[in-house]
Amino acid sequence: PEKDDAGVYNTSIVVSPTGELLAKHRKMHLFDIDVPGGITFKESDTLSAGNTVTTFDTPFCKIGLGICYDLRFPQYAMLMREQGCKLFIYPGAFNTVTGPPHWELLQ
């Protein structure tokens, strides 16, 4: 997590081979779920949402960066594509209860 005066964020950074910070993405789409008789998980109880589309340039191509549940929002990917991204990276940690249905839909 990353903390500043405005809140706590689920943040992913990209660092170049020389140690330069290339990008910092704050997860935009927080995952809140309450399954009756099942699990309750609310990132918004602890985390603040980011509000920036994150892209960065590499020698190979322009890359878009999201985090985990950001993957479920095609509008976000379309914004990165409009900015010229050829590759999208979404580090994630889907849990064993809600994760499999998300991956099945995305295959």
Image: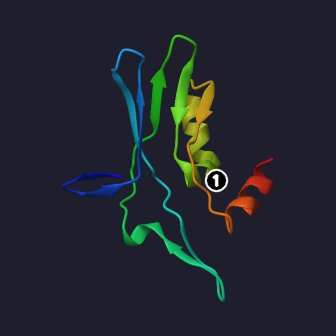
Compared with 46, 60 (above or below) is above
SS at badge 1: helix
Foreground pick, 59 / 55: 59
- In the figure, residue 81 lies in which quadrant? top right
Q: Position of residue 74 (x, y in %)?
A: 64, 47
Q: Is residue 61 left or right of residue 51?
A: right
Farthest residue to the bottom: give it: 37
Residue drawn 42% across and 16% down?
Answer: 17
What type is the residue that disc 1 sits on?
A: Arg
Compared with 106, 30 (above or below) is below
Q: How is the image coloured?
A: rainbow
Foreground pick, 90 / 74: 90
- In the figure, residue 96 lies in which quadrant? bottom right
Farthest residue to the left: give it: 5
Residue drawn 62% across and 27% down?
Answer: 87
Residue drawn 36% across and 14% down?
Answer: 18
Compared with 103, 52 (above or below) is above
Farthest residue to the top: give it: 59
Q: Which residue matches tag 1?
A: 72
Q: Residues within 10 Å of mark 1 (few under 14, many from 20)?
A: some
Residue drawn 52% across and 73% down?
Answer: 41
Q: Position of residue 38 (x, y in %)?
A: 65, 83
Q: Position of residue 30 (x, y in %)?
A: 48, 61
Q: Position of residue 64 (x, y in %)?
A: 53, 32
